[in-house]
Amino acid sequence: MTLQRAALWAIVIAATMYLLVAGRSLLLPFVLGVTLWYTIAALADAFERPRIGPLRLPRPVALLAACCLMAGLVWIVGRTIGSNISAVAAAAPSYEVRLQTLINRAAATMGIDQAPTLGRLFDQVSLAQTLSGIAAAVASLVSVAGIVLIYAAFLFVEQVRFSDKLAIIFGQGEQQARLRSVISQIDRDIRIYVRIKTVLATVTAGLAYFVMAWVDVDFAGFWAVMVFFFYYIPTVGSILAILAPALLTLVQFDHLTPFLVVLLVNGTIQIVMANVIEPAIMGRSLNLSPLVVIISLTVWGTIWGVVGMFLCVPIMVVLLIVFAHFETTRPVAILLSADGRIPAPMPLTPVG
């Protein structure tokens, strides 16, 4: 029976992976819609809590404030990225000269007589194909953004009657209480994760901006925004946040001091934040195995690209909590955990 169960699990996992890959174009907009809906709902819950005495924002006002905040953040990020792309295009000739100089020096150091030129490298790239690819990507992004907004809007409509549907499906007994317990624990752990990550990402991006602005690195604001988003990607994000600004600094300046400052100081900030401060604050709230995080980063990054990298930890948190609530899947939850101590099911609350 054990062998049959293992074979059944293997078939289920293989079929699930195939469906996730084959249905990427259908599933990814919905997943992004769920993410947007959850983020806005969490912000609205924060706005709805009383702040001064008995004052409390009505739910519609809190939702409107959350939507305005999200729209403002998207506008700021889009404006920052758009303006910096134009600036990069204007500064490209000077970077090209500096990069060619670095290539020549590296070739001379390695004893290569004829160093490759950037012009020769760029000749291998079809400009027409590149521009058409960029245009197709932009059009796809715009269309997906519209679908994501539609999904998020309908999820808010669905949220109103979702509890009533659960009552009809599971009745008023222990099953519904258990399901609500699982949902409540998932919601709590993900909110803790997102809250801590957002605060630390903001602090890390602010410190990185201060360092780059002090060294006078070009596009410091743009790279600070990228450092903020990189922080949400486990391990790989920290590496990108360290190397990308440092490489730009290497190309920008004629001497190595700014490059070493950006590399070492930003690297120290990233290491301390990700490996010292974050584990101390996060504590045992998630308790995911580091190996599981790396594997999930690879798997979900392969399936859903950058979106999968951002969502890999929340997805594994959901799986860990769900598996921990059922006897047949508790061994899997133990394997996913960092120390084998899986979260205990939350106490069942009476429903009525």
Image (cartoon, rainbow, N blue to C red):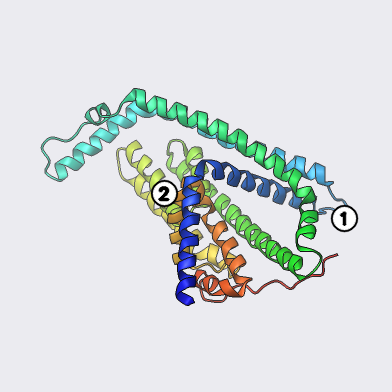
Residue 56 location (% of width, % of height): 85, 50
Residue drawn at point x = 51 percent, y = 32 percent: 140
Sequence-first tag of 1 and 2: 1
Q: Which mark is residue 157?
A: none
Classify 10 Å Cα crowding around label 2: few (below 14), some (14-19), many (20 and above). Answer: some
For marks 1 and 2, give the one nearer the viewer.
2
68 vs 183, nearest the viewer: 183
Q: Quadrant of residue 54?
A: bottom right
Q: Label 2's element?
A: helix
Q: Mark 1: which amino acid?
A: Gly
Residue drawn at point x = 64 percent, y = 62 percent: 189
Residue 177 in the figure: left or right of residue 333: right
Q: Quadrant of residue 147?
A: top right
In the image, residue 87 sits, relative to residue 340, either above or below, namely above
Residue 57 in the figure: left or right of residue 112: right
- Separation of disc 1 and disc 2 at Cα? 45 Å
Asked if residue 164 shows in the view, the reply is yes
Residue drawn at point x = 79 percent, y = 58 percent: 168
Q: Are marks 1 and 2 in contact (CB under 8 Å)?
A: no
Residue at the disc numbered 1: 53
Residue 135 location (% of width, % of height): 46, 26
Residue drawn at point x = 55 percent, y = 42 percent: 26
In the image, residue 175 sits, relative to residue 119, either above or below, namely below
Asked if residue 208 shows in the view, the reply is no
Q: Mark 2: which amino acid?
A: Leu
Classify 10 Å Cα crowding around label 1: few (below 14), some (14-19), many (20 and above). Answer: few
Residue 343 location (% of width, % of height): 62, 72
Q: Which mark is residue 240?
A: 2
Residue 339 location (% of width, % of height): 51, 75
In the image, residue 346 sits, relative to residue 93, either above or below, namely below
Q: Quadrant of residue 317?
A: bottom right
